[in-house]
Image (spheres, rainbow, N blue to C red):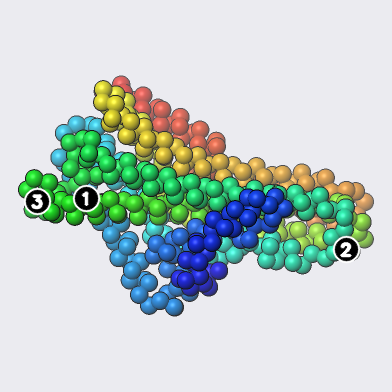
Amino acid sequence: MANGDFKSYLGLLCGFFREYRTVLRHKSQRPPRLALNYNRAFLVIMGLYPNRCLLAKYSNYKRCNRLLMLNSASLLLPIMFAIHESTNVVDMGDDMAWMIGITLIVTKNLYFYWRANEIDEVIESLNYYESCFRPTQGFQPAEVESENVEIRRWQRLCYLVETTMFSTLTCCMFLFNMAICVQPLFSDRDLPYHAVFPFGWHSSVEHPRSHMLIYIWQSLTSQFNLLSICQVDALGIHSILHTALNLKILCLEMQKLSKLQLTDLEFHAEFRRIIQFHQHLISTVEKNNRLFHGAFIAQMIASFALISMSTFEAMAAASDPKVAAKFLIFMFVTFVQLSYWCIAGTLVSTQSTYVAQAAFELKDWHTKSIFIQRNILFMISRSQKPLLYEAKPFPPFTLATYSIILQQCYRILALLREAM
């Protein structure tokens, strides 16, 4: 699918609900594709995925991509120019929160602009089990059918989780943008975002036509930015979830190996394929960490800043329920985003250590040849170190890191409250 054209990506999105319903209704149905393909297709349709194939087929795609990213970034400048007009800490915090959020969106879009071809390689790497491992398997006896059913069940569950989140988050972004755009109807603000433009064009009294155009531009650009960060984050998080799925499948494949009656030579050949699968997953995690290093750092910094700021502003605006509710929504969205990243990272780190237990539980492995025992011990030793999605020097995406971030946010919040 990385070599597809614009029409094929559009067709993939149009057939999304049909494929989703088919997998949902039939419990034995194997997912037709990785859910990551839907996120990539959405980004292609939005003009934010200039990979090698699209640039070769459509000469204007790169120009459109640059214009769209420039338009996304241009939403930031009027907000920066307006921050000096803030008369209190609540208004200033509102402007700064949007500035941090838009900066995060622009940063991640830039990473996809630079790394689209490498991301295609990662998506293909995550499909290693279906494309390379399973097709080379020989005859599967009835004794291992329960493991095959279990593998299909986990694949279906992962597909349904990812596609449900894909559709749910997309719908939520429409509702969130609607909440942003209707603010002027219930407050004294003229625009969805506090902004200053030359010649007072943002004033609804002095320039009603230009004000209306700016209102429409802010609303559409805001929706575009929210949809882009939704799909970019979903692609990143779901790549982590699929890593956890492959680690689970790896453990199930070792359980299948225990049930097969094989000679030492046959056992060695099968176990070698499992080792190659494991090494492939390790290299995929390392490749992802290099590929998204800057994006991971931006996510950590932005999440920490937004949680701290939105919580503080919600408390500072306690006398105004409408303003406090806005910051609480902002805080909730940031919490959900960071939680999703950390839960996915925790699944990978914990599941990667289960590989050692699965290798240790191989039936009668101590009676095999010395060479086979050495390979099994090597895999057990390698699996003692958990696989982590991280951006050094920051801590990895795990629930332990999530707890640390919340603790630090609370300390800063307590300090700011005392300062007030």
Picture coordinates of residue 296, whole percent (x, y): 46, 50
Q: Earlier in the sequence, mark 3 or mark 2?
A: 3
Q: Which residue is mark 2?
A: 266
Q: Are marks 2 and 1 in contact (CB under 8 Å)?
A: no
Residue 67 relative to residue 26: left or right:
left
Question: Relative to residue 226, is residue 325 depicted above or below?
Answer: above
Q: Nearer the viewer, residue 271 or 188?
A: 188
Q: Considering the numbered disc 2 on the image, is that residue within a helix, a strand or a loop?
A: helix
Instruction: Tell me, yes or no, if residue 284 can be seen here.
Output: no
Q: Nearer the viewer, residue 417 or 337?
A: 337
Q: Where residue 215 is drawn, which disc sits there?
A: 1
Would you call the spot at circle 1 few (<14 residues within 10 Å), some (14-19), or many (20 or more)? some
Q: Considering the numbered disc 1 on the image, is that residue within a helix, a strand or a loop?
A: helix
Picture coordinates of residue 123, whole percent (x, y): 57, 62
3D distance between C-alphas at marks 1 and 3: 12 Å
Q: Nearer the viewer, residue 26 or 203?
A: 26
Question: Relative to residue 224, is residue 338 depicted above or below?
Answer: above
User: Residue type at mark 2?
Assistant: Glu
Q: Where residue 207 is drawn, which disc sits there?
A: 3
Residue 241 relative to residue 309: left or right:
right
Query: Residue at (77%, 67%) from the top-left corner?
Result: 136
Please identify the quarter of the rendering in which residue 324 is found.
top left
Q: Earlier in the sequence, mark 2 or mark 1?
A: 1
3D distance between C-alphas at marks 2 and 1: 69 Å
User: Residue type at mark 1?
Assistant: Tyr
Which of discs 3 and 2 lies nearer the camera? The answer is 3
Picture coordinates of residue 174, whole percent (x, y): 38, 47
